[in-house]
Image (cartoon, helix red, strand yellow):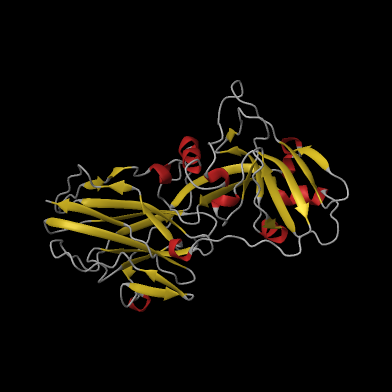
Amino acid sequence: MIQRNRKVFAGAAGAVLLLSGSGLALNAMNPAAADASDAPTGSTHTRNANTLEASWLDLGDDSLVKASDVQGTFVFNQLGTTPNDELFNVFGAALTSMCSKPAVELTDKAEGVANFYVNVGGHIKKNFSIDVSELSEDASQEMLMACSCATGAPFGQAAVLGIPLASIVEMADLEDGVNTITAYGADGFGQPLPLRYALDQNAMLVYQVNGQELTSTADGSSLQLWMPETVARYFTRNITDIELTRQAEEPDVQTVDPCYRNKINLLNYADDCTFAVGDEITFEGVADDLGSPIAAIEFSFDDGRTWTSCTTEGATADKWVNWQFTTAFDQIGDYQMTVRAKTADGLVSPLAATLEFHVS
């Protein structure tokens, strides 16, 4: 019997999957050949009237070993959380709301101020203020939720604790025709949303992230707005005011750019990694789509000629999919692994996720 060594790529491998202690015990799969009818016929394909460039389709490099219909072991889960320092550093690098402002401070109580007051006004019969942390324990909810920008990669998932926005709306005596809600941060930033959308998405006023209470050294509230399956521009931080208003037309809700839907990331890299023929090699990453559950992760080691399809049955759209694929190779040479995801509504990842490695 030949004993195969187990090799894991360098880098962030295991971090997202294992932080929650969940490990990889969920959903072991037997990979199968992908349905060729779902593959693009050329370098571009069309989905819902949008033409998307399939940049992962590259058949030109003959120096790489082409391995067809590669089989292996696949596991996935939707657990795991992003460390708070990493989560808010990412939020500080994008364009609006939580995404472009200096990251909220997550500090000890001795260094920061926890302030969970919010003023509620607009087209309601009586304005009021409330400390959401003082509402009954029965009103609080905890939820595991992913966050992603409209044109960026999946970058954060957290266990958040807070009060459903619906609880605050129920306290307000609304005037007739109120259809819009806007949460304003301490800096005056506010992004209007259809009231029905915010309630349907189970929006939350969050005061704890990954078990750590939100505090801020700045004036104003420490509250944040989180919404499942919604782009990060609406995740307003340091909320001081909520306005419920009657508008002639409901505001539009920005969704993910079609060219950035069904995003997939690799979490490991091959630099300084040594693999021998017969070694079991583990690839891992994250996939998400704001709008449709991930239905399968697919792998190709021959520039897209064949795909190994691994279903993610039971995955939901509100959380990302953490996946691992383990396989081995019996030929020396340079390889390229390409990975894509497919959603329940049939969309194939339009953007590349590839990794080159050497087997000796």
Q: Is residue 177 above or below residue 204?
A: below
x then y, percent, for residue 307: 29, 68
Whether residue 204 sits left or right of residue 326 in the image: it is right
- Foreground residue among 63 and 300: 63
State the image coordinates of residue 198 (x, y, percent, origin top left).
Answer: 68, 56
Q: Residue at x 42, y 45 (%)?
A: 16
Give the quadrant of residue 46. bottom left
Residue 197 drawn above or below residue 207: below
Q: Nearer the viewer, residue 258 or 315?
A: 258
Whole-percent x, y for residue 163 in the image: 70, 44
Q: Nearer the viewer, residue 65 or 197?
A: 197
Q: How many marks overall?
A: 0
Residue at screen point 24% across, 64% down: 70
x and y, in percent, of residue 276 in the image? 14, 50
Instruction: Give residue 41's quadrant in the image.
Output: bottom left
Residue at position x 23%, y 63% from top? 301
- Residue shown at 44%/70% (left/top)? 347
Q: Residue furthest top?
A: 110
Front residue of this view, candidates 225 and 307: 225
